[in-house]
Image: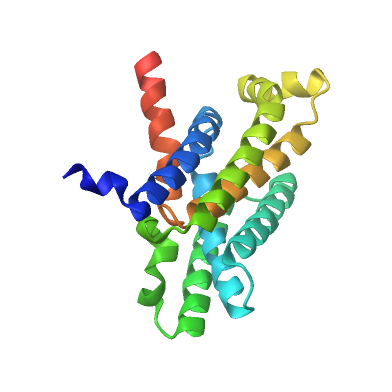
Amino acid sequence: MLDILVEPFFQRALLAGLAVALVAGPIGCFIVWRRMAYFGETLAHAGLLGAGLGLLFNVNIALGAIVVAMVLALVLIVLKRQQQLAVDTILGILSHTALALGIVVIGLVTGAVTGHLDILFGDVLTVSTRDVWTIWGVAALAMILLASLWRNMIAISVHEDLARAEGINVQRAELLFTLLIAFVTAISMKIVGLLLITALTVIPAAAARRLVT
C-alpha cells in the first residue's frame, strides 16, 4: 500500500499540493477576517473566463486567468467607488457573468466543456516536474509579497479608517492583495481547479479561527 509513495507522479502531486496549501492558508486568514470569501470565488470564476480566453487565443491559461482576474478586480474597485449597488450585488453579477462566459468560451474552443473538467476541478496526478517548479516559484513570490503586506493588511482588517489615518495606502494594499489572490488562483488551477480554490483558502482558515477563539 505504501508503494505509491515512491511513485514519481504521486511525489509530484504531493509537492505541488504542499506549495499551494502553504500559500493558501495565510491568504485564507485575511479572506476570512475581511469577509472576502465571495470575492475570492468571484476571482476564481474570472479565472475560468481567463482560461477560456487563453485557450481561444492559444496563450498560457494561467496567464489568462491572472489577467482576467485583475481586470475584474479593477472593475469591482471602480463600481465600489460609485456606490450605486451593494458590494454583494456587484460580486454576484460579476461572478456569475464570468462563470457563464467562461463555460461558453471553453465550449466553443474545445467543442465540449466536459473535455476540460480539469480546469474546473483540477487533475493533480498529471502534474509535471515543470509544473512543480513553476508552482513553487510562484508560491515563493506570493509568500514574499504577502510578508511585505502583512502588517498593512492586519491594520486594514482591524479598522480600515484607522489604517488610512496612519498613512497606509489602503487601495494599493487591497490591489496588491487582489493580485496575490489571482496568482494563487492561477497556480491552484492544476491542483484543485478553479471552482474549489475558494474552499482551499476559506475552510482551513475558518476552522483554525474556530479552534483558537
Residue 89 seen from this side: no
Residue 121 rendering spot, x and y as whole percentages: 38, 59
* For residue 62, side relative to residue 168 (left or right): left
**How is the rendered protein coloured?**
rainbow
Report the residue at 59% width, 66% height from top: 50
Outermost residue toward the right in this view: 167
Residue 19 rendering spot, x and y as whole percentages: 49, 40
Residue 57 rendering spot, x and y as whole percentages: 64, 78
Q: How many marks?
A: 0
- State whether residue 22 is above or below residue 198: above
Of 164 and 7, nearer the camera is 7
* For residue 206, side relative to residue 168 (left or right): left
Residue 169 seen from this side: yes
In which quarter of the view is residue 14 placed? top left
Of 31 and 165, nearer the camera is 31
Residue 207 rendering spot, x and y as whole percentages: 36, 27
Task: Indicate the quadrant containing the C terminus: top left, top right, bottom left or bottom right.
Answer: top left
Task: Indicate the quadrant containing the N terminus: top left, top right, bottom left or bottom right.
Answer: top left
In which quarter of the view is residue 63 placed? bottom right
Outermost residue toward the left in this view: 1
Report the residue at 43% width, 53% height from top: 191
- State whether residue 127 is above or below residue 109: above
